[in-house]
Image: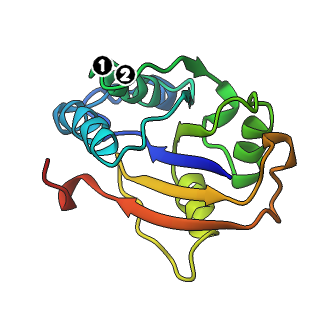
């Protein structure tokens, strides 16, 4: 059994319309939500062993803020394939993870994150910024992760719904 945590980057800023999409930073709410979600995950006993983030500034910043909380020690890998990745592309990234990692977090973007998380649910899920989906996968080895892998969406946490 593997645990996959999918996190949409925290809220980004649109204040500088000269910045390319890839370079947009987090706004004030995003800077607050990311640490809040790190604390929530820790409280749930779901500290990832590895975090893989999109190369976009807002996703990298989200991942770095999670790790700066110091609630868990996890390497951070930046992978440009997660920038606006589809479910299939996220699976390809996960398939390369060492099997010693049982709790993996991917930090990325919508619509891919919402669609991917929703593929493990019976109905459409709402996946706002900084939301985290907790998915249990019925696999022993990441290399066996495919679009047909059985999994269970255990929970979706949204910053506005939580109190730490």
Instruction: Name the residue beneath numbered marker 2.
Output: 67
Neighbourhood count class around disc 2 (C-alpha, 10 Å): few under 14, some 14–19, many 20 upward: many
Q: Nearer the viewer, residue 37 or 47?
A: 47
In the rendered view, does 73 fall on the left or right side of 83?
left
Q: Give me the residue at 31% from left, 36% from top.
A: 38
- Total labels drawn: 2
Q: Give me the residue at 53% from left, 82% from top.
A: 123
Q: Give me the residue at 25% from left, 37% from top.
A: 39
Residue 18 in sight from this viewpoint: no
Indicate the quadrant where residue 151 lies. Answer: bottom right
Tag of residue 9: none
Q: Which of marks 1 and 2 is in front?
A: 1
In the rendered view, does 83 fall on the left or right side of 44?
right
Instruction: Name the residue beneath numbered marker 1.
Output: 70
Indicate the quadrant where residue 121 lies. Answer: bottom right
Distance of label 1 from label 2 (alpha carbons): 6 Å
Q: Does the CB distance between marks 1 and 2 fall below 8 Å? A: yes
Where in the figure is residue 1, as x and y percent of width and height? Answer: 68, 52
Where in the figure is residue 75, as x and y percent of width and height? Answer: 53, 17
Where in the figure is residue 11, as x and y percent of width and height? Answer: 30, 41
- Residue farthest to the right, as pictured: 144
- Residue farthest to the left, as pictured: 163
Neighbourhood count class around disc 1 (C-alpha, 10 Å): few under 14, some 14–19, many 20 upward: few
Where 57 sits versus 32, above or below? above
Residue 38 in sight from this viewpoint: yes
Where 6 sits versus 111, above or below? above
Q: Which of 38 and 71 is in front in this view?
A: 71
Where 85 sits versus 35, above or below? below
């Amino acid at each position: 059994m593997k645990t996959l945590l999918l996190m949409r980057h925290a809220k980004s800023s649109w204040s500088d319309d000269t910045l390319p999409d890839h370079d947009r930073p987090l706004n004030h709410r995003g800077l607050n939500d990311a640490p809040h979600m790190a604390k929530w995950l820790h409280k749930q006993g779901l500290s990832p062993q590895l975090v893989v983030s999109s190369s976009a500034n807002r996703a990298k910043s989200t991942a770095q803020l999670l790790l700066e909380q110091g609630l868990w020690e996890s390497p951070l890998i930046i992978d440009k394939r997660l920038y606006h990745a589809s479910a299939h592309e996220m699976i390809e990234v996960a398939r390369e993870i060492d099997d010693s990692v049982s709790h993996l977090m991917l930090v990325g973007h919508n619509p891919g994150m919402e669609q991917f998380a929703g593929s493990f649910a019976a109905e459409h899920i709402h996946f706002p910024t900084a939301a985290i989906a907790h998915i249990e996968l019925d696999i022993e080895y990441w290399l066996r992760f495919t679009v047909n892998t059985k999994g269970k969406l255990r929970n979706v946490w949204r910053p506005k719904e939580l109190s730490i």
